[in-house]
Image (cartoon, grey):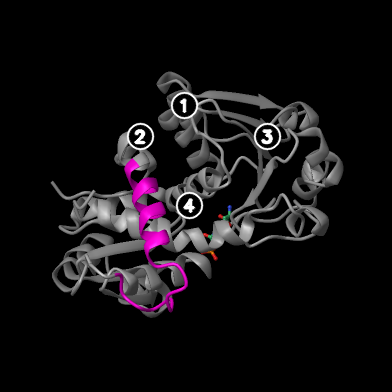
Amino acid sequence: MTRHFLDLADAGGDAIAAMINDAIDRKAARAAWPKGKPDADAPLAGHVLAMIFEKASTRTRVSFDIAMRQLGGSALVMDAGSMQLGRGETIPDTARVLSRMADAIMIRTDDHAKVEELARHASVPVINGLTDRSHPCQIVADLLTLIERGHALPGLQLAWLGDGNNVLNSLIEAAGLMKFTVRVGGPSGYEPDRGYVERARAAGGEVVLTQNARNAVAGAQAVVTDCWVSMGQHETNAQVVAMQPYQVDEALMAAAAPGATFLHCLPAHRGEEVVDAVIDGEQSAVWDEAENRIHAQKSILRWVFGQL
Ligand code: CP
Ligand code: NVA
């Protein structure tokens, strides 16, 4: 069976834990090495990852490329607009062709159904590099960062502030798989996907939805936010106004547990969802979180290739 990574549940809690442990070990083993130097065992030597981007990216694009180099393989990046896909070649035909030319495919797109269709027709692993619905690769890096900061996942109290977007859906999915609590503070009409919430609760995660930002962060060991308007969304003044009470500022961080960790997947809109004093402050782990995209991608890649 070809292993696809379209959502965290495709791997499951045990495999996510194995990915995090693998990432910690591999990161330690190459500390201070030049970033493009392959790991000593080069476990994906000779393998090629084909990446398709229908949306902008800095971290996902660079981290997958560097991850493949460190695993001994290589990656190629294609903007969908310059592919035949952008002129109407079908997703199934694209999947068939890339499966003959590359060993795995990563795609960032809008409609989640496109990733599912690609996976149905590909004979090599397909990885979701972000859709309008979810961003599972980001959350593997976030969980790794939380563990590095000394948090244990089972029982963790985590607060999310702002829009109920793709990153939050995957975080909620992780809460079910790894048994922690997500308290979401956000405005009415911008809640996370109901399916992710229900599945996480059924799996043993706790998901609390509140419109009160203070209640969301009270006692939280980690505070997480993201942009108020995601890529592909039409920004309205009403949305920006609705999000204002959920801005992560010093007062809100002070209402969380002492020393709570601040995370943001980036890119940040400073002065909107987070103020400079928080993102640049001592409790912020955002630069580790960004670097950890490399270490997480490596373990995701090793998992899709059956090495974990
Ligand atoms: N966090 C994240 O996915 O960043 P990019 O959009 O830069 O890839
Ligand atoms: N929610 C954001 C994440 C960017 C990495 C977006 O989809 O634009």
| Relative vertical location of residue 45 with respect to residue 187 in this rendering, above or below | below
Residue behind mark 2:
13
Find residue 69 and report its horizontal and vertical position in percent.
33, 74
| Relative vertical location of residue 252 with respect to residue 231 in this rendering, above or below | above
- Kind of residue indicated by mark 2: Gly
Which region of the structure is painted magenta?
18-39
Pick whichever of labels 3 and 1 is earlier in the sequence: 1
- Kind of residue indicated by mark 1: Lys
Q: CA distance from mark 3 to mark 2?
A: 30 Å
- Of 185 and 37, the residue lying toward us: 37
Element assignment for label 2: helix
Q: Disc 1, disc 2: CB below 8 Å?
A: yes
Mark 4: few/some/many CA within 10 Å (<14, 14-19, 20+) = many
Pick whichever of labels 4 and 3 is earlier in the sequence: 4
| Identity of the residue drawn at 49% across and 44% down | 143
**Residue 234 visible in rendering:** yes
Pick whichever of labels 4 and 1 is earlier in the sequence: 4
**Residue 57 visible in rendering:** no
Pick whichever of labels 3 and 2 is earlier in the sequence: 2
- Of 169 and 229, the residue lying toward us: 169
Foreground label between 3 and 2: 2
Residue 65 sits inside the magenta stretch: no
Find residue 243 and report its horizontal and vertical position in percent.
77, 44
Residue behind mark 3:
189
